[in-house]
Amino acid sequence: MSEKVWFITGASRGFGREWTIAALERGDKVAATARDLSTLDDLTTKYGDALLPIRLDVTDRDADFAAVQQAHDHFGRLDIVVNNAGYGQFGFIEELSEQEARDQIETNVFGALWVTQAALPLLRAQRSGHIIQVSSIGGITAFPNVGIYHASKWALEGFSQALAQEVADFGVHVTLVEPGGFSTDWAGPSAKHAAELPDYAEIHAKAAELRASRSAKPGDPTASARAILKVVDAEEPPLRVFFGELPLQLAKADYEKRLATWEQWQPVAVEAQG
């Protein structure tokens, strides 16, 4: 297998770090971005020139384009672009401030969009490439207390599904990775929390119980690295792939309810057509 060149955002922790290590361990090259480059010092020491650390805040569109170009110029090509940078914003919809909502969308949606746009001319020119968008089970279903996070991932899912059709003829693949709960710090230090309104106290407690039940058996980020290698090495990679045991169960339950409701209300839908 010939070596591949990766561009991975949010490589300082979680999936980004594990996938960076997995790629480097098998002899690939990685341009790894982080807002704090000191978090990559140990990897730079261990893997040397195979790793190109780049300081990047993905909400800066000009910096995104410059970082992608720097990686391409340094390694001579790009094969896999991983939009992993992002965070979870907790808070009921009424509780969110304007800034909290905008910051979530800026990072989780526009950050991925800018990196994707920066990479596309390079991938089209070489007539190959694979864009990995780190979504979530929250990209196809929704739960209380993370509504704006869901909004960001649903947006990512929408533009990525359209993108996959737009670039297929250029030999470029797009995959949405949709993890369930994993032992990362997504809900810990990386997360942000809106100020809670007293009227929602009881519902917050119920939401916390629901979240705890979904996270009772978290996935192993190290194992996810083995899984992502299978995805990027596939001759025909999927548009969507779950990571973890629980997402398929959640998706089936949600979509069965949706289909039943749509079927029930189909006479009204037909009436609306006129």
Image (cartoon, rainbow, N blue to C red):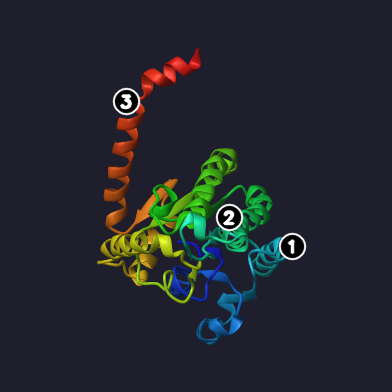
Q: Is residue 81 left or right of residue 238?
A: right
- Counting every numbered tag in the picture gives 3
Marks 2/1: CA distance?
16 Å
Q: Secondary structure at mark 1?
A: helix
Q: Position of residue 233 (x, y in %)?
A: 43, 56
Asked if the residue under mark 3 is in contact with the one under mark 2, i.e. CB atoms within 8 Å, the reply is: no
Tag on residue 109?
Answer: 2
Residue at horizontal 58 percent and vertical 55 percent from the top: 109
Q: Position of residue 53 (x, y in %)?
A: 61, 76
The residue pinned by badge 1 equals 62
The residue pinned by badge 3 equals 264
Can residue 133 be seen at all in this image of the molecule?
Answer: no
Judging depth in this view, the residue of 126 and 205 nearest the camera is 205
Q: Earlier in the sequence, mark 2 or mark 1?
A: 1
| Amino acid carrying mark 2 in the image | Val
Residue at horizontal 37 percent and vertical 70 percent from the top: 221
Marks 1/3: CA distance?
49 Å
Marks 2/3: CA distance?
34 Å
Q: Secondary structure at mark 3?
A: helix
Q: Is residue 175 left or right of residue 248?
A: right
